[in-house]
Image: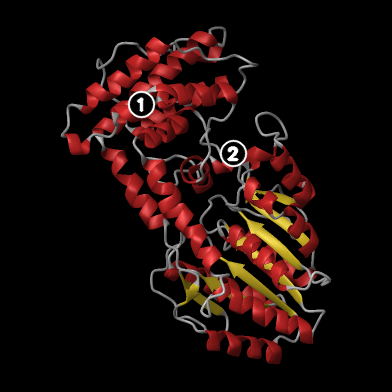
């Protein structure tokens, strides 16, 4: 996520600063004055509302607003920016970064990767790309690879497994027990408080090797190295730390902003918006959400629908950028979205780019959305389908459940843009974003958003 070198000042005529969903450094009076300013100066009759992602700091949110406001204004919209002070990426990085130098974790990752790589070589024994690539079964004969080198070494296994044509990896209960025992025995070399894996998290279906094999066989894997790292994190209890306490809390911030509390920022904004619509029914409204900001957008529309009379025909436009909203969550509000959304465009990284960089350097080698899908959202396969990830749009197993198909049908492939786009992409459908962070600020993406603001969908 982008980090500002020096905090920008809050602009109360455009910024809505919240903490825990309630007004923080701006007030209800500031918001009232901002809408007065819009009525006096918003000559185009168009306002847009930007919601940054949930893992950025207040300073980063203000920095993003500062980079976007001129383009949005020049496109004829009066912009508002929800600055909702989540700053959870710092917490996530603080939890994951120590593992890059943890000998116990590095050894466990090497052991797991080599174990599974041998199985892949055995099952795909006719694949010439794997000839001579089978890791040794002898433990402790060579120094473990760094996590960076280990990730690089798995690419050939990933390429071969992607072409497996129905092959399945076998794994006996004896092998699972041996793997769990190896983790326990290796952990005894360090003081008890520093041990990564508890025996109670290694047995039965919780066994990391069992889960790795199951995910590879079912198509829910994120690549060999990434899947191994994710499952070791889960076995070490990190999903429990990242899920409800961090990611879940961020969602509660969003819900709280639409409460009946007098200081609830989302509710106050909706009240002003509905008043503005009463005075100008033709008022155009565009909601823009990056990452978890897409969750904010959906929650906004649901609260708006509850606020409006059932007979109201008012609708909003929506632009989602690298949306961290699950298909399940979108599906819950799908009837409301169909009723209240007049225009929609969804931008995201293409599948290759999503997995091309280290979100947490030298530890986690894919994007933030992969990390959210596996460790933050509750899912038995550690593979929660997210709207902003192209991999879940294939329409093939294992991503064929009704919830995914219904949401994908609503969005439609013609309204999805996967970055980086090819030369010649139409205006409004161009993006050269190559990382999750900074998606909204990326030049081509921002130009496309501004094109939509100025010209419609």
The residue pinned by badge 1 equals 202
| Residue toward you, 377 or 65 | 377
Q: Which residue: 64% across, 72% down?
A: 49
Q: Residue at x 70, y 55 (%)?
A: 333
Kindly indicate the quadrant of the structure image that contains residue 397: top right
Label 2 secondary element: helix
Task: Give the colour scheme shown.
Answer: secondary structure
Q: Nearer the viewer, mark 2 or mark 1?
A: 1
Q: Residue at x 69, y 61 (%)?
A: 319
Q: Say if residue 87 shows up in the picture.
A: yes
Q: Earlier in the sequence, mark 2 or mark 1?
A: 1
Residue 327 is situated, as x and y percent measured from the top left of the image, at 65, 46
Q: Is residue 394 left or right of residue 23?
A: right
Q: Quadrant of the C terminus?
A: bottom right
Q: Which mark is residue 12?
A: none
Residue 295 position in % (x across, y down): 60, 58
> Which label sits on residue 352?
2
Residue 450 seen? no
Assess disc 1: are there few (<14), some (14-19) or many (≥20) residues with their C-alpha within 10 Å of its C-alpha.
many
The image quarter containing residue 270 is bottom right
Check the image and report above or below for 358 versus 235.
below
Which residue corresponds to the image point at 74% horizontal and 66% vertical from the top-left? 317
Q: Could you classify mark 2 by the number of other residues whose Cα lies within 10 Å: few (under 14), some (14-19), or many (20 or more)?
A: few
197 over 318 or under it: above or below: above
- Asked whether the beta carbons under mark 2 and mark 1 sit within 8 Å of each other, the answer is no
Q: Secondary structure at mark 1?
A: loop
- Residue 83's place in the image compared with 398, above or below, is below
As measured in the structure, the alpha-carbon distance from the residue carrying label 2 to the one carrying label 1 is 32 Å
């Amino acid at each position: 996520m982008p980090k500002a070198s020096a905090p920008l000042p809050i602009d109360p005529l455009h910024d809505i600063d919240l903490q825990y969903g309630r007004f923080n450094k701006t007030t209800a009076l500031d918001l009232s004055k901002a809408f007065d300013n819009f009525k006096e100066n918003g000559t185009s009759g168009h306002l847009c509302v930007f919601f940054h992602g949930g893992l950025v700091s207040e300073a980063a949110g203000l920095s993003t607003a500062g980079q976007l406001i001129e383009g949005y204004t020049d496109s004829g919209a009066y912009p508002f920016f929800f600055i909702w002070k989540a700053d959870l990426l710092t917490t996530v990085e603080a939890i994951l970064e120590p593992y890059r130098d943890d000998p116990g974790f590095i050894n466990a990752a090497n052991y797991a990767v080599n174990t599974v790589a041998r199985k892949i070589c055995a099952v795909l024994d006719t694949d010439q790309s794997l000839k001579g690539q089978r890791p040794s079964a002898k433990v402790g004969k060579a120094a473990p690879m760094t996590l960076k080198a280990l990730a690089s070494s798995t690419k050939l296994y990933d390429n071969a497994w992607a072409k497996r044509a129905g092959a399945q990896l076998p794994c006996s209960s004896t092998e699972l027990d041996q793997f769990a025992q190896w983790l326990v025995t290796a952990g005894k070399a360090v003081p008890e408080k520093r041990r990564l894996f508890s025996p109670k998290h290694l047995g039965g279906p919780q066994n990391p090797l069992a889960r790795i094999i199951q995910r590879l066989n079912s198509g829910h894997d994120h690549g060999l190295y990434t899947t191994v790292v994710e499952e070791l994190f889960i076995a070490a209890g990190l999903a429990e730390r990242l899920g409800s306490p961090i990611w879940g809390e961020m969602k509660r911030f969003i819900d709280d902003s639409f409460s009946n509390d007098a200081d609830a920022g989302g509710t106050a904004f909706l009240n002003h918006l509905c008043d503005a619509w009463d005075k100008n029914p033709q008022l155009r409204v565009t909601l823009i959400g990056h990452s978890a900001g897409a969750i904010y957008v959906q929650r906004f529309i649901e609260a708006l629908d509850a606020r409006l009379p059932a007979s109201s025909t008012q609708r909003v436009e929506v632009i989602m950028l690298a949306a961290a909203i699950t298909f399940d969550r979108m599906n819950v509000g799908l009837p409301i979205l169909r009723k209240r959304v007049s225009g929609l465009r969804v931008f995201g990284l293409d599948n290759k780019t999503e997995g091309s960089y280290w979100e947490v350097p030298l530890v986690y080698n894919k994007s933030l959305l992969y990390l959210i899908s596996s460790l933050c959202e509750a899912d038995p396969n550690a593979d929660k389908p997210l709207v902003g990830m192209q991999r879940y749009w294939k329409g093939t197993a294992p991503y064929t459940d009704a919830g995914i198909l219904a949401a994908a049908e609503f969005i439609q492939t013609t309204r999805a843009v996967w970055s980086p786009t090819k030369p010649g992409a139409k205006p409004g459908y161009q993006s050269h974003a190559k990382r999750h962070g900074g998606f909204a600020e990326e030049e081509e993406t921002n130009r496309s958003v501004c094109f939509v603001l100025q010209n419609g969908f």
